[in-house]
Structures are given as C-alpha cells and as structure tokens.
Amino acid sequence: SRAASAAKPDLPEPLFERYLALLEQEVGEELAVEIISEVRNALGEAGLTDNEAVTAAIRAKIAEFLPTDPAAGRLDPPGDGRPRTIALIGPTGVGKTTTIAKLAATFKLKYKKRVGLITLDTYRIAAVEQLKTYAGIIGVPLHVVMSPQELADALAQCGGCDVILIDTAGRAPRDDQRIAELSRFLDTARPHETHLVLSSTCTESVLMDTVDRFGKIDYGRIIFTKLDEAVTFGVLLNVSRRVNKRLSYITTGQEVPHQIEATESARLADLLLGERLNK
C-alpha cells in the first residue's frame, strides 16, 4: 500500500500510526507530516501518551486546514437591494443540477424563502428537463436562458425573490471558449456567491486540473458532492489546502431535498479520522 511504502518520518509510535492512517485516507504525504509534526510540537512528548488528547489535537489541526463558509445555509440579505444571487459552476457529471435542486428545496421548504431558479445549461436537454421536474415538485419558477440578455431579463423577473440560484452548463474544463462564455454570463448575473462544484470521487489530479481551468472565473467557495461514493476523504483536505477557498456545502447522496449540509470543519475532520459518513 501507499502507506507502507512511505518513508518513515522520525515519529514516536502513537504518532506514526496516526500518520499512516492519514496516508491511508490519501492525505498528501507533506500535509500528513505537517499535521503530525504540529501536533507533536503542541503536545510535547509527555502529552503524546494521552490517546484522547492526541486524537483531539489531530482533529483540531485538520479542521484548521479546512476553512468553511460561515454564511453557508444563512441567507442574509446582501444589502444591495438585489435578491441573494448564488451561481454554481463546474464540469459535467459532478452533480451540479441535483445540488442546485437541493439548495432550492432547502431554501424554500426549510427557510420559507422565495426562490427563483435560472439555468444556463442549454447544452444538455436532459439536465434542463431534470431541473424542470425538480422546480415543479418544489414549486419554484424556472427560467431557461440562452444568452446574457435573456439572463438579465430572467434576473429582473426574479426581482421579488429572496434568493436566485443559477445553474450553469457543465463546461468541459478544457474548453476555454466555453469558460469565456460562462464568464460573460456571470458578469451579467453579478452573483454574491459563486461555488465551484467538485466531486469527492475524482482523483486529486483531476480536481486540481478542474480548479486550474476554472481559475479564470472569480469564485470564492467550493461544494464537494458525492461523499457517499468516496472511498477516502484525503482529497478534500489536499485540495482545500492548495486552493485556499472556503468549503460551503457537502452532499451525501442523490435524494432531493435531503443529503446536503453546510460544511463543518469538525465533521470533515472526523471523516478523515475514520468516522462513518452516516452514523
């Protein structure tokens, strides 16, 4: 295994076991060393004999490396007179449309907000039909737009909403022309929040490639989907550490409106320490 082949850092036994456990979760080697070394320095040799203290210190250190979005799930008025406008971007197949339906359902049913749905996904008819079905069930209006001008009109029609959710086409991340087109739509929408949607089942290299491709777009938050399908969770930590954006939501299954939650650093840290996703 990868853990067994790792060069053994000079660590006392309890910490070395924790280090291997992090590698088994596919946490990057340097990052695992950094976490364990900082815990070692913080606790001192005497503190390392207390198993619970060691676990708590590692959990706290991992959580520190997973910055979350305190505004996730809170729909504070943005203060500029517009409905809070939230756009989801990301490649195809990561679960964007399902995620936006979950957000729409949560805001409407749980928070009793007036929700407007806009989709720019005119490349995949099936995704539009899927969103139409969800919108009908949730009871929110859906606007399908083909151009920035149509988007401006749709935004105006949603002016009485508390929140507007914008689903964007799943751009193939290598398609620079489509990324430029997406930028033009987002310039029109001026979202208060733009979330890059990533699947936790992808390899780190695929995720970092996606991050690089979408780097031309100004987004501040990341949603990780499909945690129920992930074998390990180290990739969440590795990507978060490298990208330095706040984690806003995670999804833990296909069910709408359930199986979405605002990200909590401690919850992700527990997963990295071997807790089950659905306890």
Image (cartoon, rainbow, N blue to C red):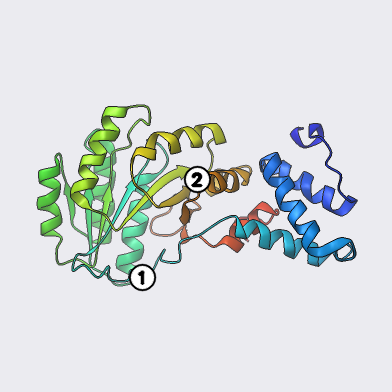
Work out whether 215 lies above or below 250: above
Instruction: Place residue 174 in its image quadrant.
Output: top left
Residue at image x 67%, y 45%? 31
- Separation of marks 2 and 1 at Cα, in angstroms: 31 Å
Instruction: Place residue 92 in its image quadrant.
Output: top left
Residue at image x 28%, y 43%? 168
Work out whether 92 lies above or below 226: above
**How far across and how far down the image is residue 60, in percent?**
67, 63
Residue 203 seen = no
Residue type at tag 2:
Val
The C terminus, quarter of image: bottom right
Q: Secondary structure at mark 2?
A: helix
Residue 213 seen = yes
Task: Tell me which numbered mark, 2 or 1, is placed earlier along the sequence.
Answer: 1
**Residue 243 marker:** 2
For mark 2, does the 10 Å Cα neighbourhood hold few (<14), some (14 to 19), or many (20 or more) residues?
some
The N terminus, quarter of image: top right
For mark 1, does the 10 Å Cα neighbourhood hold few (<14), some (14 to 19), or many (20 or more) residues?
few
**How far across and how far down the image is residue 12, in percent?**
89, 51
In this view, the residue in front, 93 or 139, is 93
Residue at image x 37%, y 45%? 96
Taking 239 as reference, is 40 left or right?
A: right
**How far across and how far down the image is residue 136, in percent?**
23, 55
**Residue 110 marker:** 1
